[in-house]
Amino acid sequence: MPRRYEKEIEEIIDRDERRTRRSERVRSVSRRISVPRASLSLSPGNLMLVGLVLVIAGLIVSSLFVLLASIGALVFIAGYIMYFTRSRSPRYEKRWRGEVIDFQDSWSNRFRRFFNRRR
């Protein structure tokens, strides 16, 4: 008769095998179903482009110039501000076994980073 811990290990292995088989099925199905979608993102460049298009449309349609040009200018300025306020790279989170690791920013770490940056 197997010991209790051996039985638990076998149960864990069985569950893991079932989970991997299920995830493989889902992956194979999702590959067949995947449809490319056009993603519309709200980036600073897109906002500035929309602002310019609105201003140009206002020049073409002279009866709505004031309205389209003012909205276009506001959207362009919003895109310009977003360009400088958003971070350049996505925030990187250090993780260990699925948990976020948050190191305290001590004076020694700041000191080390200061000298490593100068190399």
Image (cartoon, rainbow, N blue to C red):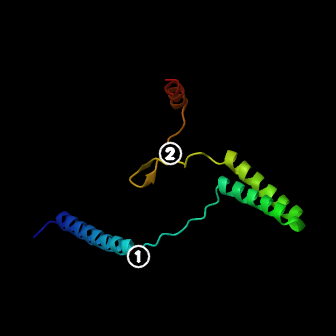
Left/right placement of residue 95 relative to residue 47 reads: left
Q: How many residues crowd mark 1 within 10 Å: few (<14), some (14–19), many (20+)?
A: few
* Percent of width and height locating residue 5: 20, 63
Left/right placement of residue 9 relative to residue 101 reads: left
Left/right placement of residue 88 relative to residue 116 reads: right
Q: CA distance from mark 1 to mark 2?
A: 39 Å
For residue 8, which quarter of the picture?
bottom left
Which residue was labeled with disc 2? 102
* Percent of width and height locating residue 90: 55, 49
Q: Which numbered dot is residue 33?
A: 1
What type is the residue that disc 2 sits on? Answer: Asp
**In the image, residue 1 above or below residue 111:** below
Q: Which mark is nearer the camera, 1 or 2? A: 1
* Percent of width and height locating residue 24: 30, 70
**Residue that appears at 49% across and 23% down:** 119
**Residue that appears at 25% across and 69% down:** 17
For residue 55, which quarter of the picture?
bottom right
Left/right placement of residue 32 relative to residue 82 reads: left
Sequence-wise, which precedes: disc 1 or disc 2? 1
Q: Circle 2 — which element? A: loop
The N terminus: image quadrant: bottom left
